[in-house]
Image (spheres, grey):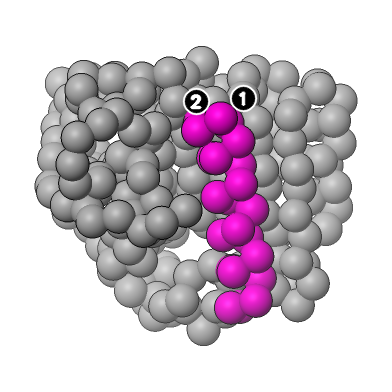
Amino acid sequence: MTSVEIRTSHTEVQSQGLKISAHQAEPVGMGSFPAVIVLQEIFGVNSHIRDVTERFARLGYVAIAPALYQRLKPNFETGYTAEAIQVGRGYKDKTKATELLADIQATIDYLKTLPQVKSEAIGCIGFCFGGHVAYLAATLPDIKATASFYGAGVTTITPGGGAPTVSRTAEINGTLYAFFGMEDASIPVEQVDQVEVELQKHGIAHQVFRYPGADHGFFCDQRGSYNPEAAADAWEKVQQLFQKTLQP
């Protein structure tokens, strides 16, 4: 798809009486466009997440990245040092699935108010912590397509406690693509297998992609684990997913 001129802005989404900060990017010009919600890593809506959001806008989507830590640490963003990982994990451990889903639904509702958004064509993508949250978000009726990148803990926990997120697989409405690095120590291959089994068992339209030699965070070009070959292939798969489901 041809790259288009875009504009970016800071916006706020109203959720349960709270203003959720968000980075928004969209094509310049007239028309209506499908939308993609970009779900952050544990590092906040940082430069990598903003870049991904803007990449989608250049492809012809209205893209928005809500701050998933807004309730805990407004305006949080950081890099990829060992200290930053510990801080980011600390906030992640305090999130709750009910609040995350409420904030994503509020983001969907906000998108639907925009005249330039095709309200019936909304998808989401998430990385790391956001990959897990994307699996949760796939259960929302308005989400037609989901790309979940190396979401650790899907088979073992859910944010805030309760049955593991994978137990909600039957609630997924649209198509889900899941991406895993086979060198990712935080997601053993047995857990990848379990995700695939559950998706198959419940008849969810899906594909699971496994990248030999790729580690956690392989898509992020700001991390030491960046794997350009795996990232490029995964980006092609993501584009195919959204073109097929949101721009048929």
Measured as percent of width and height from the top left, residue 113 is found at 21, 19
Residue matched to label 1: 174
Q: Is residue 223 left or right of residue 135?
A: left
Residue 186 is a magenta residue: no
Q: Nearer the viewer, residue 65 or 18?
A: 65
Label 1 is placed on what type of residue?
Gly
Q: Nearer the viewer, residue 240 or 218?
A: 240
Looking at the rendered structure, the secondary structure element under dot 1 is loop
Residue 242 to residue 5: above or below? above
Measured as percent of width and height from the top left, residue 114 is found at 20, 25
State the separation of the CA atoms marked 1 and 2. Answer: 6 Å
Measured as percent of width and height from the top left, residue 140 is found at 50, 20
Residue 236 is a magenta residue: yes
What segment carries the magenta color? 227-248
Residue matched to label 2: 143
At 36% from the left edge and 42% from the top edge, which residue is drawn?
61
The answer to whether mark 1 and mark 2 are in CB contact below 8 A is yes
User: Which quarter of the image is occupied by the C terminus?
Assistant: top right
At 39% from the left edge and 32% from the top edge, which residue is drawn?
34
In the drawing, what numbered circle is on residue 104? none
Q: Is residue 54 left or right of residue 121?
A: left
Measured as percent of width and height from the top left, residue 193 is found at 85, 47
Label 2 is placed on what type of residue?
Ile
Q: Residues within 10 Å of mark 1 (few under 14, many from 20)?
A: some
Toward which corner of the image does residue 209 lie, by quadrant?
bottom right
Q: Residues within 10 Å of mark 2 (few under 14, many from 20)?
A: many
